[in-house]
Image (cartoon, rainbow, N blue to C red):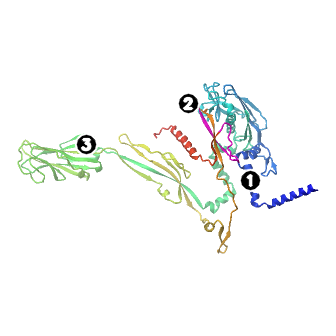
Amino acid sequence: MKRACLLALLVACSAVAAHAQTVEDRARSAAAAAQAKTGSSDALREYYVTPGMAGQPIATVDNSKTFTPTINCQKTASLLEVLVQPASTGDIGTVRISQDTDFDGSFDRSSTLPVPVSGICANGIVSCQPGTWNQCHFFKWDVDAARALKLAEVEMPELAGCYCVNNSCGTNLVFGNLGEVLKDMGGGMVGALTTVDPRIGVAQAQVNGPVIDYVGAQATACAADPTIGQTAYRANPAAIQGDAASIAAGNSIFQTLKGSQAGVGKAEQVRSCTIEREVTLTSATYDDIVTATGSLLGVASCGPDCRQYRIGGTGNCSDPPATYALRFIANKPDRIVSARILELQTADWLQARVAGTPVAYAAKRPWLTNSLPSGDCGVGDNYSAYPNYDFTDALRQGGVTVDARIRATGSHKTGYMIVEVRVDTSCATSERLVDLCAGYATDATCRLDDEDVDGVETFRNGVGTGLRPLSQTRLFGTDSCTVQLTRDFFRRSRSYKCVLDTGSMPEPDLSRGAYIIDHSTETLLADRIRKADGSVTQTSAPFALPDRGSVPACEAICKTRAPKANTAAAPAGVTGSQQNVPTGWDSFYHVCDAANVCPTGLGEEVVSACGCLDDFPEAAVMMQSVRLAGADMTCTNVVR
């Protein structure tokens, strides 16, 4: 009797305690229970993914009920089993593969690899002379028509993530890393299976000594043909857009929304344009630049861009001075380099004039006026002068006349002067930017969607790619006129998306939300409500959030490391054989337990104790180093 009363009292107290729980307490209890089953990838796999795909019971969050889901048409707890047995040479001498190809729960295919395994890759194996890295052959995992795994010999560049496991790289590598070896080898096999038949899904991998088992199912459809619609988009992702449009065209809900004001109110139009650097080359011959007509004794070349003109004749002392004029016409004044009177030669008197103005003379006495010179004439003396008079500016005005006035008699009555004109016949370059995008760039309704700068995609779908082209060097012109130019860019191809306002749908009224945000505080909730008659009512009420409790600043983690032989393999050989120190380190990060203790694995040593670790700078440096190293190894036909 006493025992029964005591039991009744305990039940009554429990009921009272349950009713005494607040809503927040019950919510926290439910959240804790859900977190226990969904708080990590391991928990999700254990409680839901594995039993769901293997056809095993799944329990509710509170474990009060169980049910067996049917989410796959076929499932098996023995999709694949791989057993390995190392040889004395360190190679894996025996690899036995067992498969359940028809998903009936029992193995129906069994095979043994015909070659020893000296190295393991992400998608295949390497088989060499046992115990060495010589006479190696490379094999990729493949699947035959009956979905049985097999090996196909390939070149090593077709394999990825290869590393050595036999004695040429170290001792006891297979047994010392048995779990990783099994996972890497089995992962390559599973990858081959799922590539051939995308319906196959793997729920769990379990390592048990030298064996790894995989639980799997046909996870995507019940069709017998692996090329089903759900997986067709993997091979042709662009097809999904057309298929979606076809389905939407026959969907009444979609068509209703499409025909509403929200659907037709605004539309976007894609507009393409370019910004191009237009380069023009012009060249000219000497005769294109300057011509000369009039009294001329002769012309001599003084270079490819230079000519010397001899102007002169005879004179008579009894007559006015004889004038011999030569008219220069500048057809391209900007290409005139220089024009000078170099030399005067005469028996008596010679005066050089430019545009009718005396500028130089050769005579017994000065003669720098237009009147007759004073003094003897016909005395037979020879006179010379080298004035080097520059009349370039006068010629660049479009044209100028240069003349020689001679006064002489007897047998010594001749005289002449030499005029030199130099021009520029090189290629002239003119350039301008033809910007056909200026209007779209300043239009507030348009936004840049795509941009290609000299073949480099700088914008894609409205987002900058982070790529920028290097300065380009290009040749322009022909064989006779060629110019090399280096510029930041030569052509930008852009597309803008511009909004077209084709409807009259009003903008939403956000005034109420703005009022709440502007007038509310941590303890007061303000509101403004507009009634049907147009009047506005303002309200305020106390407001408080429930205690959210305290949470740690971070999830405590620790960093460890373990020695690792550098067994990675490449076409040049095993990495360790190319290094002075063939041993490195593997780094690991672990979540610390409730006692803030680092759960180190076998052979690991603690590098950083439990705490809020931040190794982002180190990770960023490592990723940047790998990226730059990869960029240095990229071969292109462009000078960089």
**Which contiguous range is marked in magenta?**
581-604
Task: Give the mark nearest the N terminus, 1 or 2.
Answer: 1
| Displayed quadrant of residue 303 | top left
Q: Earlier in the sequence, mark 3 or mark 1?
A: 1
Asked if residue 608 shows in the view, the reply is yes
Q: What amino acid does circle 1 point to?
A: Ala
Instruction: Examine the rendered structure and indicate whether residue 165 appears above or below residue 319.
Output: above
Residue 570 in the image, given as x and y percentages of width and height: 58, 32
Kindly identify which residue carries mark 1. 32
Q: Nearer the viewer, residue 226 or 532?
A: 532
Q: Nearer the viewer, residue 74 or 112?
A: 112
Residue at disc 1, secondary structure: helix
Q: Quadrant of the N terminus?
A: bottom right
Residue 570, visible in the rendered structure: no
Residue 208 in picture, x, y percent from top left: 74, 35
| Residue identified by numbered label 2 | 578
Task: Tell me the crowding category of disc 2: few under 14, some 14 to 19, or many 20 or more residues within 10 angstroms, Cα based.
Answer: few
Q: Main secondary structure of the magenta part?
A: loop
Question: Which residue lies under the disc numbered 3?
Answer: 306
Residue 22 picture quarter: bottom right
Q: Residues within 10 Å of mark 1 (few under 14, many from 20)?
A: some
